[in-house]
Image (spheres, coloured by chain):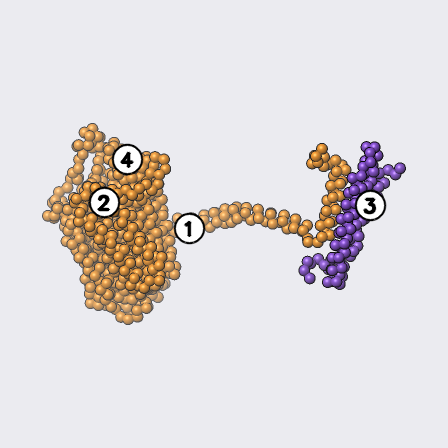
Chain colours: A orange, B purple
Amino acid sequence: MTDLHLWLIPIIPFAGFLVNGLVGRKFPKALVTTVALIASVIPLVQVATIVAKFSSLTLPHIENLGVWIRAGAFHADFSFQLDQLTLVMLCVITGVGFLIHVYSVGYMAEEEGYWRFFAYMNLFLFFMLTLVLAENFLLMFVGWEGVGLASYLLIGFYYTRDSAANAGKKAFIVNRIGDFGFLIAMFLLVQHFGTLSFTEVFGYVAAHPALQGGFLTAIALFLVLGATGKSAQIPLYVWLPDAMEGPTPVSALIHAATMVTAGVYMVARTHVIFDRSPFALVVVAIIGTATAFFAATIGMAQTDIKRVLAYSTVSQLGYMFLGCGVAAYSAGIFHLVTHAFFKALLFLAAGSVIHALSGEQDMRVMGGLRKKIPVTFWTMTAAVFAISGFPPLAGFVSKDEILYQAFISPNGGKILWAVGLLTAGLTAFYMFRLWYMTFFGEYRAAHRDELAEHGAAVHARSDTKLAVEADPHSGHGHGIHESPWVMLVPLVILAILSVIGGWMGWPDGLGGSNWFAHFLAPAVKSAHLTYEQATVALATGGSNMPNESPAGSKQLELVLAVVSTLVALAGWLVAHVIYYAKPELPAKMATQLRALYALIKNKYWVDEFYGAVVVAPVLFIARYLLGALIDRGVIDGGTLAAGYTAQGFGALVARIQSGNIRSYAGWLALFAAVLLVAAYFGWTAHFLPR
Amino acid sequence: MVPIAYYLVLSAILFSIGVAAFLIKRNIISIFMSIELMLNAVNLTFVAFTRRWSQITGHLQVSGQIFVFFVMVVAAAEAAVGLAIIIAIFRARNTLNVDQVDLMKL
């Protein structure tokens, strides 16, 4: 077996993190850049070499470096695994990751803490690569927690700003809630299988077709809880929009392209368990669909360019969950890949816009930027069309695949498909809204002050404040300018990928061969069986495993593709009318549909709801019950009481030691007299030797 | 024949006077004298008890007397050293009041 030295892939970014993190402060910027870029390009090269000799490998390829933890019969190893799924993830992480590193060189050029930024970025790569390369749940959990840490560090990058520090904490804590689910799932796995190794667990499950539901459902549901935390799904999605406090490349890398896809990856990776639990799959599908729709509606009314994209990310992740939930894992992963391309591009282009406007993030004061920053405009256009689902761009192919699978899947059904379709329309609407508001019409910078006043009054804690405070480039002072080439090159590459990236999975129904699904099939082939099928498979020794996907046809696929394209077109048209043809319309609509507008503008008051239902009680318990009563009352009180007792007794006894010889003599005489009296009455008899 | 209790009571009275003087007096020489008084009260007890012991056993017992000599020798030595210190203190402080010489350093 060829040795690929898989461990080297994550360890090199880690080395970059150590170098920049420990001594980068003293380095000149050029050196920091070199270290960071080298540390992110080497994994890319390694992945490329793996791709080159991929066909000659026996899969899954496992490399075990030794035992990590041994406790009785249980052991967890430092073992890495490479299969088709891992390879896809590796390509996305290292490819997009490297491009974003390059982009950051330009974007962060004038920032304080340049070295810190790149150290964290490398650290993030390290953990993310560990996550996808891990061969057991425990090592995966290391990466899982690690990306949370890196995310926290990067969201709170502008740590002097309260909002950024709070957003970082929020992300970390919400993620921790999800991680709790992951941990419980691991405990259940250890209890039932005695191991955390993917190969062993999945092998065991695969070898026992009668194993259905039951504790597998419990494990799957706890894994879903973990996934909802990391992938920002209902109910734990609230951290992602706030995470936009970090620098824009971070939003692109972590909160769009890679880290948030960890939940989807995890579901796909553990699909063997999910396949056996129809209930958990339905839960995944419903969570995904609901999140997709819910986040898309919120995205329609946001005015901060990055927040629109953040809700769009949440929504698109919902699609991936929908794909996984209908056991079409390859479709989910496919959307993950294309989404990584166009969402990274959207964020980077948005960053380029923000850069051009010296830190402005409020779309209401943008407009007419098409001519001023043409490269950004054209790349952004590619991404907008891709995410809206226009053929033949990447988003169309992958989103359609998911909708098609949802339509034909016995798990999914027409309702999920219909909601997904409606969401596709909303997606097109809010993306074109962003496109028109940013690039078309008049440049509305003059409205800024007016808006700032208005905004401060109406949306006290909302985006305007964010936009004004999140002003990393306020020092520029000069007019609108196109970004430097170091930022534009990644944009162009990602734009090309957003256009052609979907072609590798061009569906059968449209004359393609869906190469991607076939490539991924060995790793994520759904073994989703009904109980009867499982019994048959058991009886025939597995030779009769049905592996055809559910009934569907090329005609149906084609029809669905046309329908969803039309819906996307409708979304575009509506956005065109409202935000381009009749620019006075949005304000009018906002007044007429005041209640609805307020509802989505304020994100359904979910943050406020969580604040009242979860955060406030927890804070109350922490502050008053545990803090004031238990900590300060019982624990502090007990300790202090012991201290004061000793002190008081000491003070009393210390008065005997006055330093005056005659007082000592007096005490001596007094107690000698006492002793004499005691002896006279025989009280000392017990203490004296006979 | 004087009963031993007489000696012991006298010794106790002398010792008590010594203790009281030691506690009350402020003058170093007086304190010194009260110490001598206590030492000699104890000497009296030694002698009285040895004498009584000789009577009970019928043999001459002298250990008490010997101890008294030791006490006297030590007391003499102590007096020599003590008086020297007192003179030194008086020269330095120009007083013999112990309340004014309660610090080691000058």
* Labels 4 and 2 within one chain: yes
Dot 3 falls on which chain?
Answer: B
Determine the image quadrant of residue A552: top left
Q: Secondary structure at mark 2?
A: loop
Q: Are marks 2 and 3 in contact (CB under 8 Å)?
A: no
Say which mark, if any, is on residue A3.
2
What residue is drawn where x is 60% and y is 47%? A645
Q: Is residue A545 above or below residue A407?
A: above
What amino acid is labelled 2 in the image? Asp
What amino acid is labelled 1 in the image? Ala
Spatial CA distance of label 1 from label 3 is: 81 Å
Farthest residue, direction right? B1
Dot 4 corresponds to which residue? Answer: A213
Residue A490 percent coordinates (x, y): 22, 59
Farthest residue, direction bottom? A478
Say which mark, if any, is on residue B13.
3
* Foreground tag (4 vs 2): 2
Dot 1 corresponds to which residue? Answer: A616
What residue is drawn where x is 21% and y is 68%? A372
Q: Residues within 10 Å of mark 1 (few under 14, many from 20)?
A: few
Dot 2 falls on which chain?
Answer: A
Left or right of B67 in this view: A332? left
What amino acid is labelled 4 in the image? Gly
N-term mark: 4 or 2:
2
N-term mark: 4 or 1:
4
The answer to whether one can see residue A406 in this image is: no
Residue A245 percent coordinates (x, y): 33, 58
